[in-house]
Image (cartoon, rainbow, N blue to C red):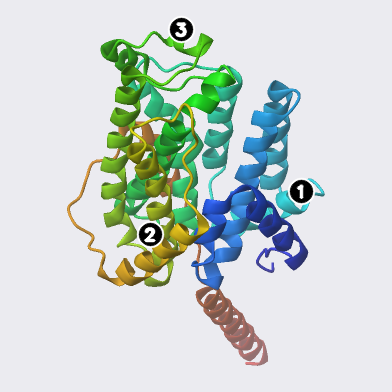
Amino acid sequence: MPSPSVAKADLAACRALLRGGSKSFFAASLLLPPRIKTSATALYAFCRVADDAIDLGADPSQAVQEFLRRLDAAYAGTPDPDPIDRAFAATVALKQIPKTLPAALIEGLAWDVEQKRYETFDSLLDYAARVAGAVGVMMALVMGVRDRESLARAADLGVAMQLTNIARDVGEDARAGRFFLPADWCAQAGLDIEAFLAAPAFSPAIAAVIKRLLDEAEILYRRAESGIARLPLDCRTGIAAARRIYAAIGHDVAAAGYNAIDRRARVPASRKLVLALRAAADAALLSAGALHPALPANLFLLETAQDQPHPEPRALIKLLDMFERLERTQRAAIAEDRSLA
């Protein structure tokens, strides 16, 4: 059976989607090697479409059920007649990405629909593991990385990015009636969550909580560097660039005194270019460093990914096929010799 592949037209649709709606990912993806870029683009496009449909759709609850159906169809090898779905189905088949990982993403998006609140930082990590840690692990699998330490660091990077997004969007989320910051941190800082949601305004209390969240993200960004060092050399620049670009969003929030209420942090294109060039210069110098335990919130992602067998290289499959054909030919020849004896 021929290996699945992403059609050129489907890939073009994925790229167009990300160019318009996921500029940070699109900028970093330009640095990925061609052997990885197609699968990464298809994977991220499906995640982006799911996020937008559930977050922005007229009926978010129905959108969750619809994307679970589309996920089932993609894994059954009968994707919807949509270029994003076709590209995603080909990618998960080729890279042997377990269904549990994209399903975890959709579960996290369903929590958004429920407008779930998070009492503690650990419960917020459970959410971040689903909506972003799962994406990090899937990207690692696309790159052919399946050892536990590397997967743990990929999940760390995804979670760090999500914490940065939450910090950046505090004001925007509050005006939409959403709130992600840990309730116990808010209580410790003297922030009344309901009063803040009724009239979102910058204050020393909200600044303290945002700072605390970004400090946690920085810890995970640093831990992620050792995982980037374990990636194939030609993949390191793209992921290192993504790490630098997302961290820079948090740095912009910090530079504004942690005011993510009255402004939305952005990293201009010129700055992204500088960060990407730095990532390229540093890629070969990154060190694997010390081992770190996986975040408890990410453990189920790692176990799922490690349970999946390694994809066999095409050259090996061809070699095994050749030996099998040779063995059949030899058996047939021996059987014919015996019949003539």
How far apart are the alpha carbons under marks 3 and 2?
39 Å
Q: Residues within 10 Å of mark 2 (few under 14, many from 20)?
A: many
Q: Which of pointers 1 and 3 indicates the residue nearer the eye? A: 3
Which residue is tagged 2?
240
Coordinates of residue 177 in the picture (x, y in percent): 57, 16
Q: Which mark is residue 96?
A: none
Q: Which of pointers 3 and 2 indicates the residue nearer the eye? A: 3
Q: Is residue 209 left or right of residue 70?
A: left
Q: Residues within 10 Å of mark 3 (few under 14, many from 20)?
A: few
Coordinates of residue 245 in the picture (x, y in percent): 42, 53
Q: Quadrant of residue 57?
A: top right
Q: Are marks 2 and 1 in contact (CB under 8 Å)?
A: no
For the residue labelled by badge 1, is the local secondary structure a helix, a strand or a loop? Answer: loop
Coordinates of residue 259 in the picture (x, y in percent): 40, 30
The image shows a total of numbered marks equal to: 3
Which residue is tagged 3?
195
Which residue is tagged 1?
78
In the image, residue 4 above or below residue 44: below
Coordinates of residue 45 in the picture (x, y in percent): 64, 50
Q: Earlier in the sequence, mark 2 or mark 1?
A: 1
